[in-house]
Amino acid sequence: MKTIYLYVLDTLADWEIGHLTSEVQSKRFFKKDAEKVAIKTVSHSKAPIHTMGGITIVPDAIVSDIVAAKENLLLLSGADTWNDPRHDGILDKAKEFLSLGGTVGAICGATAALANKGMLDSTPHTSNGPGFLEMVSSEYKGQEFYVDRSSVSANNLITAGSTNSLSWTKDIIESLDVFQPDTLEAWYKYFDTGDANHFYELMNTLPAAMN
């Protein structure tokens, strides 16, 4: 079984994780032989956190409970509080994941946190737009590896900007290998465009029993 460790912290950007958590938890579009996936919320302590939208989340675990492994994922969402040194532990854990071949996903402000720790210096990545990381991180040295795209997946690191959570989720789901490729493409097109034709296309990719 794969485990997605979702790091939660005060002012977490609710909208950036919604597509992913709903699809992984519901499994409504999973392919028939998909491996089991669990989501665990983790934080620097067991104290409740409050998202940007005012939702209270009580973490399932703390950073020391995380099992860094090739088959697991660590997801870091945007927030206004990444400069708090209490989050250094999860950034060290991100380095451990990458060293073991595990996948790390970071979006919005979390990309700045990675930049501060040198994790974007030598691998393709993106963020909130050209110049953003230079503006918020004095330690950032990865300019030559910046890619101006909605989401970038390279070397087990998946990055995106704050308005591109759908593309980020698509790349994460692809890395999990829990959707058929045609299901994933139709899913993305439907939620990206709202065109009902893509909804029917999506439903037609599923086993008959699920339609």
Image: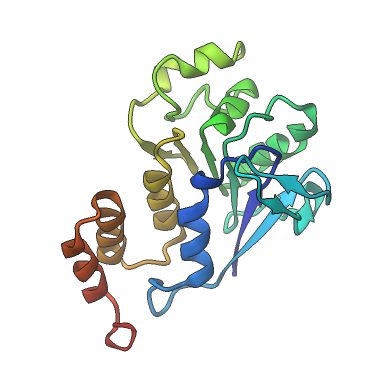
Residue 71, given in percent of the width and then of the height, sits at: 57, 59
Image-quadrant location for residue 98: top right
Q: Give the residue furthest to the front.
A: 54
Of all residues shown, which one is farthest toward the bottom? 209
| Colour logic | rainbow
Looking at the image, is 201 positioned above or below residue 163?
below
Residue 97: x and y, percent?
63, 45
Q: Residue at x 43, y 50 (%)?
A: 169
Asked if 208 appears above or below 74 in the picture, the reply is below
Quadrant into which the N terminus falls: bottom right
- Judging depth in this view, the residue of 56 and 22 nearest the camera is 56
x and y, in percent, of residue 207 in the image: 29, 82
Query: Is any atom of residue 75 visible in this view?
Result: yes
Quarter of the image holding residue 95? Answer: top right
**Where 92 sits versus 130, above or below?**
below
Residue located 67% across and 59% down the image: 40
Nearer to me, 60 or 139: 60
